[in-house]
Image (cartoon, coloured by chain):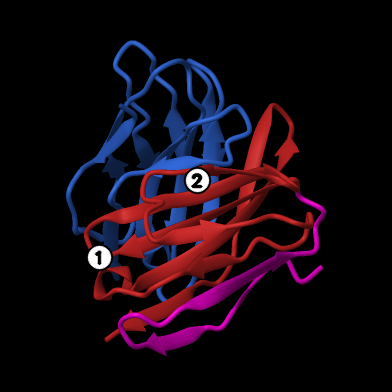
Chain colours: A red, B blue
Amino acid sequence: NAGVTQTPKFQVLKTGQSMTLQCAQDMNHEYMSWYRQDPGMGLRLIHYSVGAGITDQGEVPNGYNVSRSTTEDFPLRLLSAAPSQTSVYFCASSYQQGGGYEQYFGPGTRLTVT
Amino acid sequence: GNSVTQMEGPVTLSEEAFLTINCTYTATGYPSLFWYVQYPGEGLQLLLKATKADDKGSNKGFEATYRKETTSFHLEKGSVQVSDSAVYFCALSLNQAGTALIFGKGTTLSVSS
């Protein structure tokens, strides 16, 4: 298994541009999530999905869209990039193990918006 | 609302010292609690978890006990190694699936030989 993969690893955008961060997992996990990590802020939940066709907002959803058409993929769309969206973005998927669920994180995408 | 508060870092220790990183939480209901570790340049890895009150999570010599009465989940290790140098995050889950996590701001641990 490749686990959770994210592309690209690095991206530079200009203000107002749009782009999609890709996330895929090959473990048949039902649940997937997107987080952003900023210095001194820890990780904050952007959107999450509990299955294909079902998504919900997290702590900081504004400026981001998601969709979940397949179990494997959970892309994150920036509609009009802003400098405040400069961050490291992590995708995660999770499955049930024992009495709870365990999340696997991807390696991250470092995004800079100028 | 739901939140997690961790002790401010950085924490600097000598090898074989005892480690405690404090974590307290505010939540509605009874969340699951987690500790994640992030080594330099890498993503997050689950270190340990506890799904109900009085559960003790443990892994790689690290332990944490889910204390409902004090809303705490402090991370401890009896003897740290240089290889434990990393950023540690406490987190709680918003849902039963543990898929939507609220994280603390992270505590940087630096261990010297």
Vertical comparison of B17 with B50: above or below: below
Q: Position of residue A101 (x, y in %)?
A: 66, 37
Q: Position of residue B31 (x, y in %)?
A: 48, 24
Q: Secondary structure at mark 2?
A: loop
- Quadrant of the rendered image containing residue B58: top right
Q: Nearer the viewer, residue A110 or A18?
A: A18
Q: Report the residue at 18% width, 54% height from top.
A: B9
Q: Amino acid at mark 1?
A: Pro
> What are the residue bounds of the magenta stretch?
A1-29
A94 left or right of A87? right
Q: Are marks 2 and 1 on the same chain?
A: no
Subunit of label 2: B
Q: Position of residue A22 (x, y in %)?
A: 62, 73
Q: Nearer the viewer, residue A57 or B40?
A: A57
Q: Mark 2 highlights which residue?
A: B61
Q: Does the stretch in magenta take in B85? A: no
Q: Mark 1 highlights which residue?
A: A39
Label 2 – label 1 distance at C-alpha: 28 Å
Determine crowd level at label 2: few under 14, some 14-19, many 20+ residues with C-alpha closer than 10 A: few
Subunit of label 1: A
A10 left or right of B27? right
Q: Report the residue at 53% width, 21% height from top.
A: B55
